[in-house]
Amino acid sequence: MKLYLKTTTIVIAGTLIFGLYSSLYTVEEGMQAVVVQFGRPIGETVTESGLHIKLPFVQKVLKFEKRLLYWDGDPNQIPTKGREFIWVDTTARWRISDAKRFLENVASEEGAQSRLNDILDSVVRDQVSSSDLVELVRSASWTIPDDDAMKDVPKEQEEKLKRAIARGREEITRTILMEAQKTIPQYGIELVDVRIKRLDYVESVREKVYERMISERKRIAAQFRSEGEGRSAEILGTMEKELRLIRSTAYRQVQQIQGKADADATKIYGNAYNQNPEFYSFLHTLESYKESVNPNAVMLLTTKSDFYQYIKSAMPSTSSLPQETSAPISPMIVP
């Protein structure tokens, strides 16, 4: 009997301890809890951290985050207002604002991520397809670059750069946030922020953009080459002109110097020969004898020619020479 009472006492005590333990639960900092009885939430959401009480065995506690959670959508191929197909990658921050409603509508964070995919993807697609690409890329505070940055930009591109922005990227993201906030609260979710992480062309459009960029760079390079060739021709023409001017000036100076030298030489010769004209005539005749020697030619001269006057005067007697002859006589060279 005593053993039975002891055993019963131990069982009852153990049951009480287990029941007391099962009736207590803790909520960590940054978490919130919903008490569920037979699958249905009861009472208010527990948002304060610490130790709390529930009915043992029949009630269950489900805990949810109070902190910010992140949503990263899959990149989508969306056409813009101008029919340019681009990849749009968005992200958002959200939190569970009403845990009971959240539990009733989406049950878990995975269900919330799936519902956010549907809502945000639809809103992002609507806003991107109704906006121009330039508005998605630039902000409303974007300013036109200065003249130095615009000097190499083609005219058709310059018009696009100077185009006024009606809606910037920030306003588009704010519109996406406001449109999504109209639907999301019914799921116990508070959408805090939405951002566009990345914009990019689709592969087919990207290749065309690269081709256009390459073509534009080639056009600019050809323009630079043309300007360089024109400048080179201008420099070469100026150089050739200056070179001709230098040559003509130098040639004129050479001719002037040579003319002056010839005049001085002639004057010197004239002054020298005027001192003894007979000697000049004799010396000049000797030079003629020397220059007239040609083995392939014959000179026909008479003995009365002045060409032999110094030869005849140098002979002791002229009686042995004929008075006149037309026979060829080879010129004599006085050594």
Image (tube, grey):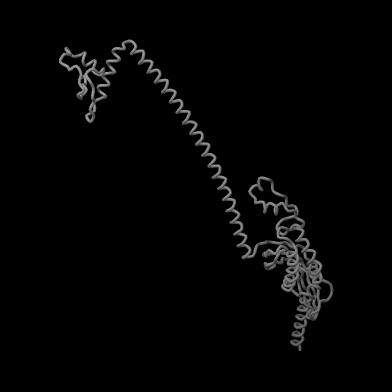
Position of the C terminus, as image quadrant, is top left
In the rendered picture of this protein, how many numbered marks are placed on residues? 0
- The answer to which image quadrant residue 87 occupies is bottom right
Q: Is residue 283 above or below residue 125?
A: above
- The answer to which image quadrant residue 80 occupies is bottom right
Pick whichever, 183 or 82, lies toward us.
82
Pick whichever, 318 or 220, lies toward us.
318
Pick whichever, 22 or 170, lies toward us.
170
- The answer to which image quadrant residue 281 occupies is top left
Q: Is residue 301 visible?
A: yes
Q: Is residue 29 visible?
A: no
Q: Is residue 281 above or below residue 51?
A: above
Q: Which residue is outermost to the bottom? A: 1
**Residue at x 71% of width, y 56% of height:** 138
Horizontal and vertical percent position of residue 134: 71, 58
Horizontal and vertical percent position of residue 34: 79, 73
Horizontal and vertical percent position of residue 243: 48, 34
Pick whichever, 88 or 97, lies toward us.
88
Q: Which residue is outermost to the left? A: 320
Position of the N terminus, as image quadrant, is bottom right
Going by the image, does 326 lie left or right of 103?
left
**Residue at x 37% of width, y 15% of height:** 268
Horizontal and vertical percent position of residue 328: 20, 25
Q: Which residue is outermost to the top? A: 275
**Residue at x 75% of width, y 57% of height:** 168
Q: Is residue 132 above or below residue 250?
A: below
Going by the image, does 253 lie left or right of 308?
right
Q: Is residue 311 above or below residue 223?
A: above
